[in-house]
């Protein structure tokens, strides 16, 4: 690997002179400057960008922090983020959970998009400064330099449950994920829709998962031990719904003839399996989050909360 010292030796100058040229300083003669740039090109030399940012205290990198790689919708968000930031000359750094905090400063990254329930509000508030704005996608934080971008969970979830009631469903089970704002809103919408139609969700009909497919599979196995199946299993996301579908299929339980199943997210697999769900525009979600973050980085930030619209997609897993 060619280093700055090698370019300096070939040019017959000091490493600091090469550095001055690469950093655009005007204290180097035109002939020497042209020689150094020519040698860099001929030898495929690229400056150490991370080292440069450490020295200058600036960065053209966006940090995206998320919980894990198991859930399909993350990829769409990442695609949306990357497509926008690359048009603005920024790079993307992706990390998960415990690793994120050390990169959340303006020497490593210019700002952060956060989608990680394990990250504490107090840490996010501490890290967010006028030099380091943060966009959060999974909670509301009323603090300077933090923008909350949330999915409008309640309205489409309520519409979904009301639609199931109109199709004849009377007894419901709900499969929730970990205790996130998304899960809370989806559950509350389910309860409210049932209540307004003279129905209720019994305590025994609430099953707890973790948003992963395996937990949906396990919950469905438990559900099948009850004396009577509910008319509908409303799942807080697609991955758990797909796990439930797998368990029902293995036990010759027909969907939707024996039980309707719904999800939330509208992943590509959900579309293939014709799962009734709520579509979240996750590509656009990432794109808009990146747009708001870069505007904040460049001094034009709007930190008012922002709602992402979602729509019900009726497919064959409902009545």
Image: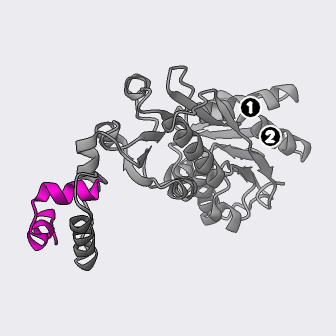
**Residue at x 77%, y 28% (from the top left corner):** 200
* Residue 220 visible to the viewer: no
User: Left of 82 or right of it: where is 184?
Assistant: right
- Other residues around mark 1 within 10 Å, as few (<14) / some (14–19) / many (≥20): many
Residue 296 pos. (x, y %): 53, 35
- On whether residue 11 falls in the magenta region, the answer is yes
- On whether residue 97 falls in the magenta region, the answer is no
Quadrant into which the C terminus falls: bottom right
Q: Which residue is mark 1?
A: 189
Residue, far bottom: 42
* Residue 10 visible to the viewer: yes
Q: Helix or strand or loop: what does disc 2 sit on?
A: helix
The answer for how far apart the CA atoms under marks 2 and 1 are is 8 Å
- Other residues around mark 2 within 10 Å, as few (<14) / some (14–19) / many (≥20): many
**Lower position in the chain sequence, tag 2 or tag 1:** 2
Say which of 38 and 213 sits in front.
38
Residue 280 pos. (x, y %): 68, 49
Secondary structure of the magenta portion, mostly? helix
Say which of 113 and 242 sits in front.
113
Residue 203 pos. (x, y %): 64, 28
| Quadrant assignment, res 246 | bottom right
**Residue at x 50%, y 43% (from the top left corner):** 210
Q: Is residue 18 above or below residue 93?
A: below
Q: Which residues are magenta?
A: 1-23
Q: Which residue is mark 2?
A: 161
């Amino acid at each position: 690997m060619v280093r700055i010292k090698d370019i300096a030796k070939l040019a017959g100058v000091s490493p600091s002179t090469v550095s001055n040229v690469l950093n655009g300083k005007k204290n180097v003669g035109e002939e020497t400057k042209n020689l150094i740039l020519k040698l860099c090109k001929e030898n495929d030399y690229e400056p150490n960008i991370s080292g440069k940012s450490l020295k200058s205290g600036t960065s053209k990198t966006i940090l995206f922090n998320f919980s894990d790689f198991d859930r399909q919708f993350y990829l769409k968000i990442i695609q949306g983020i990357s497509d926008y930031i690359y048009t603005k000359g920024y790079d993307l750094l992706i990390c998960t959970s415990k690793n994120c905090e050390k990169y959340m400063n303006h020497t490593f990254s210019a700002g952060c998009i956060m989608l990680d329930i394990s990250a504490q509000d107090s840490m996010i508030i501490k890290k967010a400064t006028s030099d380091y704005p943060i966009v959060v996608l999974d909670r509301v934080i009323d603090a300077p330099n933090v923008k909350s971008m949330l999915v409008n969970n309640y309205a489409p979830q309520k519409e979904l449950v009301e639609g199931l009631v109109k199709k004849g469903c009377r007894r419901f089970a709900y499969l929730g994920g970990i205790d996130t704002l998304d899960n809370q809103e989806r559950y509350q919408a389910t309860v409210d829709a049932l209540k307004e139609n003279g129905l209720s969700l019994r305590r025994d009909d609430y099953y707890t998962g973790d948003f992963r497919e395996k937990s949906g599979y396990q919950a469905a196995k438990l559900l099948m031990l009850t004396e009577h199946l509910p008319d509908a299993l409303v799942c807080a996301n697609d991955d758990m719904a797909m796990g439930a579908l797998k368990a029902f299929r293995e036990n010759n339980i027909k969907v939707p003839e024996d039980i309707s199943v719904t999800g939330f997210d509208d992943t590509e697999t959900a579309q293939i399996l014709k799962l009734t769900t709520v579509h979240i525009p996750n590509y656009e979600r990432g794109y808009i989050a990146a747009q708001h973050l870069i505007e904040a980085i460049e001094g034009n930030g709007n930190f008012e909360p922002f709602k992402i619209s979602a729509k019900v997609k009726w497919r064959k897993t409902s009545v």
